Amino acid sequence: MLTFLNQVIARFLKSRQDKANRKLLAGSDLFDAPWYLRANPDVAENEIDPALHYLRFGAAEGRQPSPDFDGERYLEENIDVLESGANPLIHYLLHGQHEGRGIFKANDPWNGIAIDPTSTNPLDLSSKTPVVSVIIPIYDRVAELEEAIESILGQTISAFELLLVTDGSPEPTMAVVNKYRKHPKVRIFEFPTASGNAVRGRNKGILEARGEFIAFLDSDDIAFPDRLEKSLVYLQQSGADVVYGAWEALIDGTRDIPDIRNGQVIQSPNATLALLEKHCVPSQSTVMLRKSALQAAGPLKRSMEYREDHELWARLAFHGAQFRALREPLVKIRLHAGNNELNFKSNDDVWFARFKQEYKRPALHPKKIVFVIPGASINGGIAVVLRHAHMLADQGHDVSIVNVGRVGNLSDWYPNVQVPVIHYVTAPRYCFDNIDMLFATGWQTANYLNAFEAKRKLYFVQSDERRFSDNPKVKKKIADTYRIDCEYLTEAKWIQAFLKDEFGQESYYVPNGLDLSVFHERAPLVSRSERLRILIEGPVVIPFKGVADAYHAVEGLDADIWLISSAGKPEPDWKLDRFFEAVHFSRMHEVYAACDIFIKMSRIEGFFGPPMEAMACGCSVVVSKVTGYEEYIEHEHNALVVEMGDIQGARKAVQRLIDDNALRQKLIENGHKTAADWTWEKSGAAMKAVVDHES
């Protein structure tokens, strides 16, 4: 009852206030009712009282009361009035004129330049070369998406391109997108997993855009046929950096919007930084802006899950961008229960506070980074590349993987691949445009550094791969790749040394890391028991990985023997208690954590990662003196180290661990400390330094 009474009182007070203010307007030449109706045909068409409309809606929407009073300029010059939320003309009539505040005449109803489509324009809007790039980020629309796409393809000008960016989209949505793969104006970019909002998709479009101007459209909105033409002409004639316009509401009844009716045209005022600090003025689907403005201020911020467009508009204005609003509606915007903003409305105060903090801070200018890999099968080096790719993508860079080898699915063995993986043969050629950093990741990929244009070309050397072959011709080919004129980086200091000593190549040092959220002692495959378990790991089919040596070192010892092979099966006469083949990366810890002793007898390694993984999962470790072990392994401190190929020495080392529980526990404890110190955060910081370095 009290709430209802309060509503009645509020309506009564509002009515009294409107009556008093209408009387004030009637007595002033600064409100011209006939002119207001001519300038705002939607008001005239709906037979709305002009004074009442101006008081309740028009001033807030930036509409001018007459050609003799510019309300927006009044608010710009009087920030205290803007912050109070007062109607500018009412404030002037009640207070401003007595306080000596100045007024300004309006150039036209929207304080801008009226569009004259027949005027001389330096842009060739009939050109086949895109003048404007339209970006539609896509998640899960179907019928609405097709309508949005067709509304752009049906524009009155032809000098545009349409960039469709999918975001882990489901099959029905991809079926719509696939219809346009061969359309000459459409380019399609795909992300394999959903990001939760449209920021990543819009930023990808911005990065790939060929046009001088960029326009946004949401995947469920509809552009009017002349939307691009009007915006382009207005940008040129006004000299503004950002233009936007009115929009028409499309309401399907699934969302409660008490103040807007279906078909209503919503206007937006010219935005200033002062106004943008309070309100998100432009509607994103109506916006067109100069690409140069985004290059100066930066694109959208991934950290802004909500109000991301508001933060961008304010940051653009903070960097000096000029905003101008068009009178005409440019798009139809759907308002429905599926609008993503509804997921954040309950925390709007939190996001508004973050917006206030963020818009003055610089934004990351993302780089387009491409890693070229030699195939998709299980491979420790490729796992390292994927980890770096994900970390760089998390920083906001645009990262993709190009497979130049046998077609395969990295997700079969690596968890949650979130960056696009494309094949060199089947991917559209435009996927290889605008590359900032191109990484070769193995000798088979090194010559692809010459296949693409890139601002920086780098060779990520993860081992001396000459050792992988006995063929002199292959060894020479591999050696020749270490003479390529490019930047080098590597994961181990011994690799740095041979690149410098043999080939005169300086290199960045980017050590590997370990993800303790993946490798840990929790949830072992089976619990440990009094009878110890020995784990052997490595591809059986690759001799230099020393799997056979490791088996013969532990054969017949008083312990269970387990084997994990990423490729190949054990010999028939090997007596194993358990055998695992091609274990998914995310489940390796389950096997490690079930075992007590880990042995690896490799003769060739780069960084030598599996022993560290085993340490993190609570294993005591026995290894051979292979290249890379000295990066983190210390004999008798966190592991027992034997000479390469010394099967009897390895057998004695394992037997010591079986017999000496105190020694085993000491190695386990120190191994834990070692693993905890080799974080991917440190590795990521080293890679970031490489990416940020200006060569």
Image (cartoon, rainbow, N blue to C red):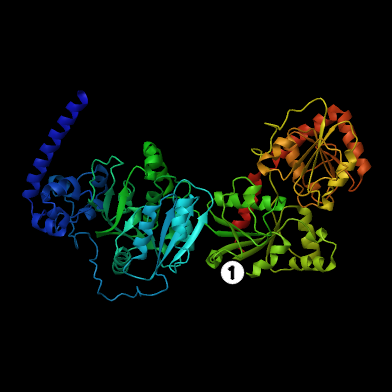
In the image, is 223 to the left or to the right of 640?
Answer: left
Query: In the depicted view, which residue is nearer to us: 255 or 38?
Result: 255
* Image location of residue 546, percent across then percent down: 85, 48
Most distant residue in the top direction: 1
Residues 633 and 466: in front is 466
Q: In this view, does 165 lie above or below 521?
A: below
> Which part of the image, by quadrant, shows the C terminus?
bottom right
The quarter of the picture where residue 183 lies is bottom left
Quadrant of residue 646 within the rendered picture: top right
Tell me: residue 281, above or below residue 224.
above
Residue under label 1: 453
Mark yes or no: residue 362 visible.
Answer: no
Q: In this view, does 154 lie above or below 195?
A: below
The quadrant of the image that shows the N terminus is: top left
Residue at (67% x, 60% y) in the render: 406
Residue 375 percent coordinates (x, y): 68, 58
Relative side of 624 to 39, left or right: right
| Amino acid at circle 1 | Glu
Residue shown at 24% from the left, 62% from the top: 112
> Who's the residue at 36% across and 59% down the image?
321
Instruction: State whether residue 633 appears in this view.
Output: yes
| Secondary element at image label 1 | loop
- The outermost residue toward the right is 648
**Image position of 600 (left or right of 646):** left
Residue 345 falls left or right of residue 471: left
Q: Residue 272 location in percent, x, y?
A: 31, 54
The residue lying at 82 percent from left, 45 percent from top is 570
Q: Quadrant of residue 508?
A: bottom right
Rendered location of residue 376, percent (x, y): 67, 55
Total labels drawn? 1
Crowding at label 1, few (<14), some or many (≥20) Cα neighbours within 10 Å? some
